Amino acid sequence: MADNTKTLADIADIVNDITGVDQAEVTPEKSFIDDLDVDSLSMVEIVYACEERFGIEIPDDKSKDLKTVGDAIDFINAAQA
């Protein structure tokens, strides 16, 4: 769970930097588009920032599957394993 907490904090920081959404609003069950009002351009920026921050690659076909913050946490943790 510690990994998830750190990953969530890093994602919240990235989302805040790119969109201005309060970090407290970024929780695993939130949808990037529906709940956090992330537009498609900002989502691309978030994906790139996550790739840099976590040292992973998120292919375009996989980035489309990252609907919620929890999806992103799961993908990042699996990619780092």
Image: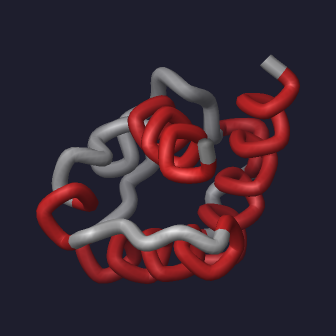
Q: Is residue 31 above or below residue 79?
A: above
Which is nearer the eye, 50 or 14? 50
* Residue that sits furthest to the front in the current view: 81
Residue 59 lies in quadrant: bottom left
Taking the spot 61% from the left edge, 51% from the top edge, the residue there is 80
Is residue 74 rendered to the left or right of residue 52? left
Q: Nearer the viewer, residue 72 or 59?
A: 59
**Snapshot quadrant of residue 14:** bottom right
Relative to 15, 2 lies left or right: right
Q: Is residue 73 above or below residue 49?
A: above
Where is residue 70? Give x, y as percent.
48, 30
Residue drawn where x is 66% and y is 54% of the image? 11
34 horizontally vs 55: left or right: left
Q: Is residue 35 in sight in this rendering? A: no
Q: Residue at x 70, y 52 (%)?
A: 12
Q: Nearer the viewer, residue 26 or 52?
A: 52
Residue at the far left: name it.
61
Picture coordinates of residue 78 (x, y %)? 50, 39
Name the quarter where the C terminus is drawn. Answer: top right
Q: Is residue 36 visible?
A: yes
Q: Residue at x 44, y 43 (%)?
A: 75
Residue 2 sits above or below residue 47 on the image: above
**Left or right: 17 as drawn, with respect to 34:** right
Q: Which corner quadrant of the image does residue 68 belong to?
A: top left
Vertically, is 48 above or below 66? below
The picture places residue 20, in percent across and down from the top left corner, at: 65, 68
- In the picture, the quarter occupied by the N terminus is top right
